[in-house]
Image (spheres, rainbow, N blue to C red):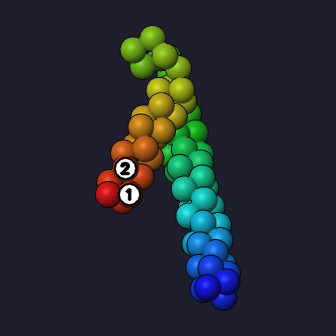
Amino acid sequence: MLRALTYWLFRYRRTLQGTVVVSAANPQLFLLAIGAGLGSPVQGDVEGVPYLQFFARGMLAAAGYRRMIWAT
């Protein structure tokens, strides 16, 4: 029993580390590349909000939606 528990905890730890890194790094890299890179020519605000904040909120919503889809 203890051997099986140790095995599954080890597997979960490996999976968890990869999931956390991908879930955290992917939106940040995309925000840096697209938001800051292509957003620099955008002058002014989008609906009264600075472009980078507008884009970051969209990325947060998209990441949550993607996570919800994969969790089910």
User: How far apart in space, not on screen, are marks 2 and 1 (Cα)?
Assistant: 5 Å
Q: Is residue 8 toward the left or the right of residue 38 in the image? A: right
| Left or right: 20 in relation to 67 | right
Q: Residue drawn 44% across and 47% down?
A: 63
Tag 1 secondary structure = helix
Secondary structure of residue under mark 2: helix
* Image coords of residue 51 (percent x, y): 50, 26
Q: Residue at x 61, y 85 (%)?
A: 1
Q: Quadrant of residue 9?
A: bottom right
Q: Is residue 26 above or below residue 57?
A: below
**What kind of residue is marked 1?**
Ala
Q: Are marks 2 and 1 in contact (CB under 8 Å)?
A: yes
Tag 1 residue: 71
Indicate the quadrant where residue 71 lies: bottom left
- At x 45% / y 11%, what residue is drawn? 48
Query: Exactly how many numbered labels are in the figure?
Result: 2
Q: Residues within 10 Å of mark 2 (few under 14, many from 20)?
A: few
Q: Quadrant of the C terminus?
A: bottom left
Q: Residue 17: which disc?
A: none
Where residue 35 sits: x, y (%)? Answer: 52, 39
Circle 1 residues within 10 Å: few <14, some 14–19, many ≥20: few
Q: Name the one closer to the observer, 23 or 11.
A: 11
In the picture as drawn, the residue positioned furthest to the bottom comes out as 3
Please report the residue visible at 36 percent of the width from the left and 45 percent of the height from the top.
65
Which mark is on residue 68? 2
**Picture coordinates of residue 13, whole percent (x, y):** 65, 71
Residue 47 at x, y = what percent?
39, 14
